[in-house]
Amino acid sequence: MATLTAIWDGRVAAGSLRADPAQAAILPRLEALRVWLEAQAGARRRALLPGFLRKPPEAPKGLYLWGGVGRGKSMLMDLFFGECAIAGKRRVHFHTFMQEVQKGLHAARARGAQDALAPVAAGIARDLHLLCLDEMQVTDIADAMILGRLFGFLFDAGVLIVTTSNRPPADLYKDGLNRTLFLPFIDLISTRLDVVELASPTDWRRHRPEGAPVWFVPPGAASRAAMDALWADLTGGDAGGPLVLTVNGRAVDLPRYAGGVARASFWDLCGRPLGPADYLALAAAVRVLMIDDIPRLSAANYNEARRFVTMVDALYEARVRLVASAADAPDRLYLEGTGAFEFARTASRLVEMQGAGWGG
């Protein structure tokens, strides 16, 4: 069986990944966790045989991998997850995971549970051996107040956790309301997870030829091919999968998501009655957003145009990297009709967001 380092080296040699010593240095840590998990899976199978009573070894620490945007944290975690040959594993965006937890808590309280978190945590941990959480960030007080107990339940149930974040643990929920109640969770992470910085000097999401386009006109086969190539470059060739953000009971569907990069059509994002809260959640969940097929805007699609403006404002304030195919250049997208004059501000922002230095 090839090690993660051998697999990574093979992809570098094939040109699907770029060599990065800082990334390579993380692989032995992940390989050790992979070996342990696969050995435990074998031990569990043997334990089903009559007379086999060997006690499994104590679980190793999990991993909290943090570093700047675009350094390859998600790619490394996905490589580890994909090559870990065990049942009972899950990889999920942290935002989605916490929405599921909050939904479970609501349902448990509706059933009259005095301690709603206990059944929710037990349900998560059932038959789960590996939990990979991408892009841990804590901004919601409701999440902050339950994370310590939730992770304590999962650790006690033997779940090994690997997570990525743009922040070191000490900066999670920084300046948040009642943060002192959150501090035990930071201590728990430091005790039960190895905290490792991915100190790569290169932001691979910005690694593109100077002046390379991120706004493709017009939509069509050529633009789609260029967008596909950028997707492959930004995600390391990951095909991605759907990501659903639930905001106030509404679902914001992103058809493709991988490692902080999301892709959707204009109509996916602006053709539905979404509002500012939805777009703020979108901007918080992604670092790069690729939008296909932005049409000309006018009075004929005024509602969709208004939502587009709201979305661009949210992306701009969060400094999300934007890649798009569109019917025309930003300053020629909305030339007449109600809202055309106000769109000049949006067009200016779209131009600014094309700059090589843009991004959080």
Image: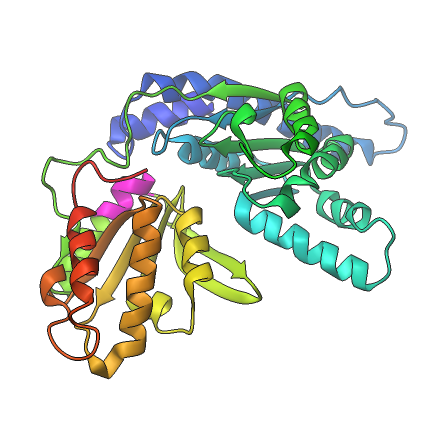
Q: Nearer the viewer, residue 343 or 65?
A: 343
**Residue drawn at 78 percent across, 45 percent down:** 122
Q: Position of residue 317 (x, y in %)?
A: 33, 48
The answer to whether residue 37 is above or below residue 121 is above
Determine if the magenta segment contains residue 232.
yes
Q: Nearer the viewer, residue 54 or 248?
A: 248
User: Within the image, what quadrant is residue 307 found in?
Assistant: bottom left
Q: Nearer the viewer, residue 278 or 262?
A: 278
Q: Is residue 52 left or right of residue 71?
A: right
Which image quarter is the C terminus in? top left
The answer to whether residue 264 is above or below residue 150 is below
**Residue drawn at 64 percent across, 28 percent down:** 37
Q: Is residue 195 left or right of residue 51?
A: left
What range of the chain is rendered magenta? 230-237
**Residue drawn at 55 percent across, 51 percent down:** 96
**Residue drawn at 11 percent across, 72 percent down:** 335
Secondary structure predominantly adopted by residues drawn in magenta = helix
Q: Give the residue furthest to the right.
A: 51
Q: Position of residue 109 (x, y in %)?
A: 80, 59
Residue 329 appears in the picture as rendered: no
Q: Is residue 293 left or right of residue 171?
A: left
Identify the coloring: rainbow
User: Within the image, what quadrant is residue 313 found in?
Assistant: bottom left
Residue 182 appears in the picture as rendered: yes
Determine if the magenta segment contains residue 97.
no
